[in-house]
Image (tube, helix red, strand yellow):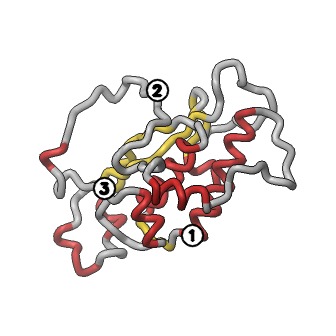
Amino acid sequence: MTSSLLTPKRRVSIDAQRDVTGSTAPTAILDWTDDRGATLLRGLDVAAPHPEREVGSRAGARIDTLRRAHGAIAGAVRPVYSVQDERPVSEVLRRGRGSCSQRLAVLEAVARARGTATRVRGLLVDGAFWYPRFPRMRQIVPDSVVLAWPEFLVEMEGEAGQDGTCDGPEMREGWLGVRALR
């Protein structure tokens, strides 16, 4: 959970309409090239295609890999509440537990490690959503919380409509939202 109340000095205004191209590069958080991170990511075993499913396009293969990684991460990283969004993926994997944002960062690191560009959109959540989760801390829960919500570039130019894999409301100009991976 990232709160502007808790991190006011890092607030940066950006043009919300600007299209973000995404990246496959590692970052301080998405540290998939770190020795520990790379070893643990290889252990998720998501490189091979799913044997029960024919994948008809590159976009379909990317989505299949992301879905398998999503399932592997759910089994490897136990969900916990945490406000330390800056924790690197390698540390989340080493601990075997992480918040929703931290677990999505692991998925994002897997995607980047496999060559799928990612970008993050801010998801504004009403602070009341957190009240049942933190009943004793209600007084310090902010009015709204911004969550980092990743998107994955699964459909490159020229691949659209090859197998129907990327149709639907979860796709925006080749970018797939995380909800479509369930």
Q: Quadrant of residue 153?
A: top right
User: Residue 78, position in %: x, y?
Assistant: 50, 73
Amino acid on which disc 3 is placed: Glu
**Residue drawn 78% across the image and 33% down it:** 57
Quarter of the image with the N terminus is: bottom left
- The reply to whether callout 3 and callout 1 are in contact (CB within 8 Å) is no
**Who comes first in sequence, dot 3 or dot 2?**
2
User: Residue 135, position in %: x, y?
Assistant: 28, 79
User: Residue 142, position in %: x, y?
Assistant: 22, 60
- The reply to whether callout 2 and callout 1 are in contact (CB within 8 Å) is no
Amino acid on which disc 2 is placed: Thr
**Who comes first in sequence, dot 3 or dot 1?**
1
**Residue drawn 50% across the image and 49% down it:** 109
Residue 57 is labelled as none
Instruction: Decide: few, some or many residues near mark 2? Use Cα within 10 Å; few <14, some 14-19, many ≥20.
Output: few
Residue placed under numbered mark 1 in the picture: 76
Residue placed under numbered mark 2 in the picture: 21
Query: Mark 3 or mark 2: which is in front?
Result: 3
Q: Which secondary structure, mark 2? A: loop
Q: In screen coordinates, is 25 left or right of 56?
A: left
Residue furthest front as drawn: 35
Query: Mark 2 or mark 1: which is in front?
Result: 1
Residue placed under numbered mark 3 in the picture: 86
Compute the Cα span from label 3 to label 2: 22 Å
Q: Is residue 92 above or below residue 66?
A: below
**Residue drawn 29% across the image and 62% down it:** 84
Q: Is residue 111 above or below residue 36?
A: above
Compute the Cα span from label 2 to label 1: 30 Å
Q: How many marks?
A: 3
**Who comes first in sequence, dot 2 or dot 1?**
2
